[in-house]
Image (cartoon, rainbow, N blue to C red):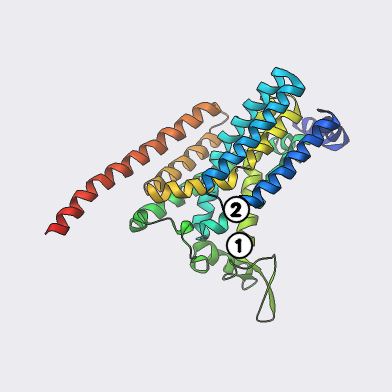
Amino acid sequence: GKVRQGTVVLEQFGPAGVHKFFNAALIFDWCLFLVAACVALVWRKSSQLLAPLTSLLGWLALGAIYAVIIFGRMGSHHGSNWVAGYFLELIFLIENVFVFHAIAEAFLVPAKRVVSCLVLVAWGQICFDVVFYMGLAQWLRSWVLLPYLLGLWLLGLGVSVLRHSIDEPEEQSAPSPSASDTSDAAQSPAADMLRNVVGNRVDMDGHSDAGFLVLREKDIKVPILDVVTCVLLLADFLLDIDVVLTKIEEIPNTYIGFSSSALATFLIPELFALSQDMLSCFPLLHYGIGLVLCFFGLEMVLQPLVEVEPLISCAVVVVILAACVVASAVKDHWRCPESGRAGRA
């Protein structure tokens, strides 16, 4: 049964899957998507100096305009599915942002550098979605152990974030290491692991260099920032499998599902930047991120036994983060009077 099922999925991933993907809409509709992608390129370039919230509003406006076009061209049924797919993708992106934060914490990379990496990750996810919607996601999902491996990996990330928050509580009152303007990437635990695996082939101090290769002391090395980008892409690839399969079940038309995912994916850098601002204002959110990652990991490990709806999962995340925000506010409230009494003394 499983071998036959995998064979069928592989056949769909071939020419049949490609034809089904592109035949889901007219050529004109695909041209409209290419126009939207070009507009996204222009907005990404022009919004570099804007605040993350302002840039986020621009991306939401682009999504709203595209939704209006879908309603006008394909009717209310497909339009409603597109809007639902757009917001469903945003919900799933919350999980991705938390994972990206954990990776940034592991490498101690500045937030500005991570945001530039996530611009590439966003385009990479769109490319992943293309092959996933052609059938690759179903084939990968047929691997029985994959959800368990992903779940254990998320649990490991969550525990790592919690341990970092507990072991170094003094950093909770300061901005996150990944939110500062300087980087200790060369001294990060992830950098030590890289040294043990690849030796001196990675430029640990090259996070500020542009390009994929740098010349250091007559040796060609890979900048640490490129390694971080590859790790972010790999994490995004693995997390995107279940997202695409969920949207395929909810939205039969691949054009509607894919285009709604792509327009929402452009928000990844801004969502990450806003999350860093929240961490600076509410330091106890570090604990919330660790708990959320553990929750997502348990959700994947227990998926065969307990199936949690995306909206319920999102509600759990909101409750955890809201509790951490309230706890941070209460902690700051009690700290301020103590500081005032100390000053008067």
Local crowd at mark 2 within 10 Å, few (<14), some, or many (≥20)?
A: few
User: Could you say which is closer to the camera, residue 344 or residue 313?
Assistant: 344
Dot placed on the residue nearer the N-terminal end, 1 or 2? 2
Q: Amino acid at mark 1?
A: Leu
Residue 5 is situated, as x and y percent measured from the top left of the image, at: 78, 30
Whole-angstrom CA distance, mark 1 to mark 2, is 19 Å
Q: Is residue 193 left or right of residue 14?
A: left
Q: Secondary structure at mark 1?
A: helix
Give the position of the N terminus as an image quadrant: top right
Circles 1 and 2, Cβ within 8 Å, touching? The answer is: no
For image coordinates 70% across by 68% down, the residue present is 213
Q: Which quarter of the image is occupied by the C terminus?
A: bottom left
> Callout 2, which amino acid?
Gln
Q: Residue at x 83, y 33 (%)?
A: 22
Q: Mark 2 highlights which residue?
A: 48
Q: Residues within 10 Å of mark 1 (few under 14, many from 20)?
A: many
The secondary element bearing badge 2 is classed as loop
